[in-house]
Amino acid sequence: MTTLIDAVELTRALIRRPSVTPADAGAMDVVEETLRSLGFACRRMRFGEIENLYARYGTARPNLCFAGHTDVVPVGDAAAWSQDAFAAEVVDGVLIGRGAVDMKSAIAAFAAAAAKAIADGTVSGSISFLITGDEEGVALDGTKKVVEALLAEGEVIDHCVVGEPTSSETFGDMVKVGRRGSINVEITVEGVQGHVAYPQRAANPAPVLIRLLAALQARPLDDGYPEFQPSNLEVTWIDVPNTATNIIPGVAKARLNIRFNPGHTGASLAGWIEAEAAKAAEGFEGRITVTPQISGEAFLTAPGPFTDVIATAVREAAGREPELSTSGGTSDARFIRALCPVVEVGLVGRTMHQVDERAPVAEIRQLQTVYERLIALYFARFS
């Protein structure tokens, strides 16, 4: 007989493992032991210093996957917390701890929902878990590498649910059916250092960088895209490493980020920035180097049977119709989309990454109910 799982107690056990990226601190062991006890075949997939786990119950299709991460962001000012950030204390019905919202509670809730489905005999296919320890970090040795390995092996995942905290103001008011893409760009302008009184003997990189950034910001990227908000470019860092008042600097640097909708690709935006840099370099006795890093492309899981299952599960368990949104930042869904359609469903994200990150116990249990309905509806629809 399958043992049922208390989602709140499992969340507390996970929080008590201080798995600040890239440390695992035994968090993945807790997940693996829990899933093995339910009959899942578990594979640890370590890349670099990152612990990852792929676990599957059953061998038949359809394969419904839950994806999430055990790693968390640093505590910050520990003294500002009302409770120890890793003690997982419940105060007045609220669980306080790093990872309570983002997103150890979702892992626990889906494990508890899977245990219930297995006990009830309603899994007419497979349930799998793709859990990483590298979502809050650089995300190079986590889900990205696991997805690449699963694709190479021919592993088939039909649909995926990611447990990120997607609700906006009230539990169940929003799920994510897509995300904007993200590209980071570093720009280095190298000139010729010299004395400010003799500019003819120098090549000041600062005005060149200023003109380039102004040109980039002057272009409206778009007015939006169906289901997506407009793309935006933000300058995130500028540095001219010069401590003297009478020296023309030899170098100037900047970084920027663009969050973009499907009207663009990372490559097209990188090409545009490089073209603008080439214009800015005309007549300049120096060099401009553009170094782009594409974090992920924009994607959308189109409305259809899978999104209907998600919305129905939320409506039946939470009592409200969720908005199907593409707002917010990026998540590991950007990698999973290479395997299958993906939707994100989770708690209210208001306190994620904050001091006293917290989740009401009642909402963790409600999330488990959403996942229970989701699993039942999924296999009824796709088996």
Image (spheres, rainbow, N blue to C red):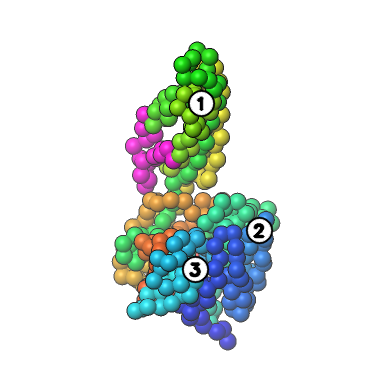
Three-letter code for the amino acid on which mark 1 is drawn: Pro
Q: Which is closer to the viewer, label 2 or label 1?
A: 1
Residue 198 magenta: no
Residue at 43 percent of width and 67 percent of height = 79
Asked whether, in this view, residue 349 is left or right of residue 154, the answer is left
- Asked if one can make out residue 194 in the rendered structure from this viewpoint, the answer is yes
Q: Residues within 10 Å of mark 1 (few under 14, many from 20)?
A: many
Q: Earlier in the sequence, mark 3 or mark 1?
A: 3
Q: CA distance from mark 2 to mark 3?
A: 20 Å
Residue ID for mark 1: 249
Image quadrant in which the N terminus is located? bottom right
Q: CA distance from mark 3 to mark 1?
A: 48 Å
Asked whether, in this view, residue 39 is left or right of residue 349, the answer is right
Three-letter code for the amino acid on which mark 2 is drawn: Glu
Residue at 43 percent of width and 77 percent of height = 89
Q: Residues within 10 Å of mark 2 (few under 14, many from 20)?
A: some
Residue 49, which numbered label? Answer: 2
Residue 143 image offset from top left, x and y in percent: 58, 56
Q: Which residues are magenta?
A: 218-236
Q: CA distance from mark 2 to mark 1?
A: 40 Å
Q: Which is closer to the viewer, label 3 or label 1?
A: 1
Residue 219 magenta: yes
Residue ID for mark 3: 104
